[in-house]
Image (cartoon, rainbow, N blue to C red):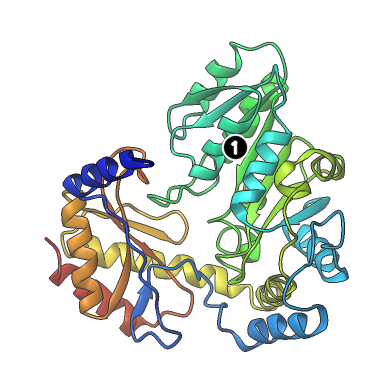
Amino acid sequence: MAFGWIDEQAQVRRRAGLVRTLRPRPADSPLLDLAGNDYLGLTRHPEVTEGAARAARAWGGGATGSRLVTGSTALHAELERELAAFCGAEAALVLSSGYAANLAAVTALAPHGSLLVSDAGNHASLIDGCRLARATTQVVAHADPDAVRKALATHDGPAVAVSDTVFSVDGDAAPLAALAAVCRERGAGLVVDDAHGLGVLGDGGRGAPHAAGLAGADDVVVTATLSKALGAQGGAVLGPARVIDHLVNTARTFIFDTGLAPAAAGAALAALRVLTREPERAARARAVATELHTRLTAAGLEAVRPDAAVVSVRAPSPEAAVRWAADCRTAGVAVGCFRPPSVPDGVSRLRLTARADLTGEQIVHAVRVIDAARP
């Protein structure tokens, strides 16, 4: 029977407690949200929603084509200019998602004969970029610059190290300055995904590369998403203008994909302007994450100290993690649930995301619910 193997795989997933289901939420959900990635509380900000609506009214519901045909608007160009200026980059390129941005950067900057050195904790989009690139890939120990150095020493040609800036599972930050120093020893490039750093780390939320003194470096390329701290949708690649020009001409997920919808571009631009005007939102998101961690550990839970806005709480098993998250939801608090294969070490977790707009009372309530629901 066609696709008969699907039923066998479904049974394996059920036995392992790894079945995933869609759970559509209403617009007016009563849940306290610690599962989404709205780090700065901007996705419903009136200026952001009006930015989306104004763009849709002006440009329509979609971009109508790829960026190289009809999908580039004046709004896209405006967003790229302001995003590059905010992050300290020479140029930026907006794509339809952060996933597409990572595929574009990795595949276009690692041609046949080159080496990709990838952190073992990298996001799936970076991993897939390595798989699709024509380069050879070496996966190295997590957040270990010396392991990167040793891998680069095995190769004489062009090379690129690839890493998240803030890892999405545990929320720990990569040693970016040390990674850049190692790459420079060998003349290698560095591509970093700042999805969880933009809007949270750096001066006024300018991102982890900015905080590490790498903004504007000619050997560093930064990818980012517009769907987390900026509360919209889409992705971007930031770096030297010649790199961005190269992506325009060679990156398949840019060339052959429809451009980002104008409404998403308008929302992201509005959010960026709010953040520029209210830089304290970044510090508040970090403070909320720290308070969540402090209260969770005080309750006896095993939580990883956050470097940005992600707080990870260990669960004893995949089944326990699913049950724990479901019980939290029943009690009115939405939390993320990470299980294999989404976790590189095979350890299931609850994943909490701090938001700049959470009150002290909401933090206390969330921790009480999580503690009471523990398996």
Query: How many numbered callouts?
Result: 1
> Looking at the rendering, in which quadrant would you find the C terminus?
bottom left
> Looking at the rendering, in which quadrant would you find the N terminus?
top left
Residue 219 picture quarter: top right
Q: Write the residue at 32% across / 41% down.
A: 4
Residue 290 picture quarter: bottom left
Of the pair 1 and 175, the residue shown nearer to us: 1
The x and y percentages for residue 99 are 59, 50
**Taking 288 as reference, is 11 above or below it?**
above
**Taking 192 as reference, is 320 above or below it?**
below
Of the pair 46 and 172, the residue shown nearer to us: 46
Left or right of residue 34: residue 119 = right
Left or right of residue 316: residue 30 = right
Q: Is residue 267 visible?
A: yes
The x and y percentages for residue 243 are 81, 40
SS at mark 1 in the image? helix
Of the pair 11 and 222, the residue shown nearer to us: 11
Q: Which residue is mark 1?
A: 129
Left or right of residue 325: residue 290 = right
Q: Write the residue at 16% across / 49% down.
A: 316
Q: Residues within 10 Å of mark 1 (few under 14, many from 20)?
A: many
Q: Write the residue at 27% across / 45% down.
A: 7
The x and y percentages for residue 214 are 69, 44
Q: Is residue 214 visible?
A: no
Three-letter amino acid code at the position of disc 1: Gly
**Taking 53 as reference, is 93 above or below it?**
above
